[in-house]
Image: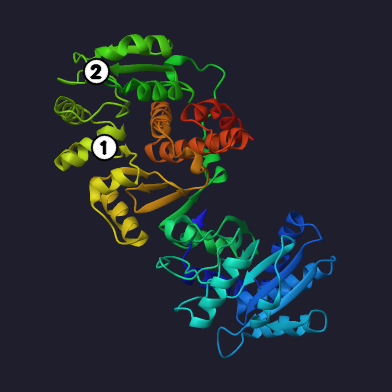
Amino acid sequence: MKILTSDQIKRADIHTIEKLKITSIDLMENAAMACSNWIRNRYLTSRKFIFLCGNGNNGGDGLAIARIISKFGYSCSCFEYSIKKKSSEDYLINKKRLKSKIKILTIEALKTISFNKKHVIIDSIIGSGLNRPLDENLKEIISWINKNAKKIVSIDLPSGMFTEYNNENRHIINAHYTLTFQFPKLSFMLPEAGKFIGKFKVLDIGLDKNYIKKLPSSFFYNTKKSLKPFFKKYKKFDHKGNRGHLLLVAGSKGKIGASILAAKVSLFSGLGKLTVYTPKCGVQIMQTSVPEAMLEINNGKDYLSGEFNSKLKTIAIGPGIGTSKVTASFISSVLKKCTSPLIIDADAINILSQNKKLLNYVPKRSILTPHPKEFKRLVGSWEDDQEKLTKLKNLSLKYQIIIVLKGAHTCISLPTNKIWFNSTGNPGMATAGSGDVLTGLLGGLLAQGYTPDICARLAVYLHGSAADMASNELSKETSLSSDIQKYLSQAFKKLYK
């Protein structure tokens, strides 16, 4: 799914109106009907809806929704705020349609209401048309709403939010749900603004899909629908010899647990064979904990050291290896001898940060999986989300590598100047070992012949999907990294459907 700019969305609206011979007011009615259906499915008629409407097209959406759901017995009140001197034509049409049925008050009258849990605020003050700072009065109103409202549903995007960047330190409606049209917005994916949207739902309002397909984009949303065509199901005559063979380079004294997590999950990916390359201290515990794995034993007692000498081509490296000098030298040996794409994680990334010249030896299309602090060690700090994404793209392009920047809506940056934002996952994944689980899954999929870009997208999606199931069943607080492995089978089954 593409993520488009506000300008592209506006052009898609105009094109749809002209090409499909639909009026703008009918397109607005489509949006209002889609929102109304969602609201009716989500809330009982005992709820009281308070609509906050600007006098632009976003406010027109709000008035149309109020008119539609009031027909089904919902209690609706509308409060108007003039965001500009001249109201939009479609807003005035919907105001005329509504006026005889629902009284429209000024937004200042909102403060006379004593909110309780039955009240639901529908925020449609200003949507993707925002292109300037808010006036002081609206800032005050937004602050008051955030402080007093019990439940808020924003239409298109929370009022006060820009569609793309520059959302830091702004007055923005803090929504519980956001109903957005046709595509997710880039701002939803970024920490500065994403914290304000709650859960979001993308609603189809009938924009011309053929036109949308032709629009260029650098940003995409990584979903089940976008991945399903690439998923490789088992064939009747498959055997372990053609399901891939992964070499997992992992472990050091005190950190063998990381290698165990990665090893187990790689085998849960459909992988045919696994060999773990480990220092001597990891042999006994690895053979006991993962009997399905074969071992190649490094000469180092407690840490990987010396020259890398394995002949296997698909390699995942990093979980629990430490950053000692002997291990850094060993990593240099790995990079200089390997030509096929690698999975590089954890301490292996930290070693690259300490000696950035080694980045020149990373094979093209390799997958690096830093968390934000590890990424900062690679590229330096950034001022805002826009600069962070620029640094992410630049690093991918410079070294022709894939970077999986972990976090909410994990970013998958490809050396084609494209970034995919993941649709699965939750805060319960912020726990020790979660990254090791992802490394094992990435390695297992890469060994099975997935291209590196599909491997990265599929692994991140499955990783998050399994974590979502674990969180739903157990809770975010009690979910462990090993639980992600346990729920991977369900994540794969969900992908089949």
Q: Earlier in the sequence, mark 1 or mark 2?
A: 2
Q: Residue at x 70, y 62 (%)?
A: 34
The disc labelled 1 sits on which kind of residue?
A: Ile
Q: Position of residue 335 (x, y in %)?
A: 20, 31
Location of residue 312 (image quadrant) = top left
Foreground label between 1 and 2: 1
Q: Residues within 10 Å of mark 1 (few under 14, many from 20)?
A: many
x, y percentage for residue 428? Answer: 50, 39
Question: Dividing the image into 4 quarters, which one contains the C terminus?
Answer: top right
Q: Name the secondary structure under disc 1.
A: helix
**Residue 366 placed where, x, y %?**
30, 37
In the displayed structure, does residue 417 sit left or right of residue 102? Answer: left
Q: Is residue 194 above or below residue 115?
A: above
Whole-number angstrom distance, CA of label 1 to CA of label 2: 21 Å
- Camera-side residue of 282 and 418: 282
Q: Which residue is mark 2?
A: 310
Residue that label 1 marks: 349
SS type, badge 2: loop
Above or below for 187 versus 113: above
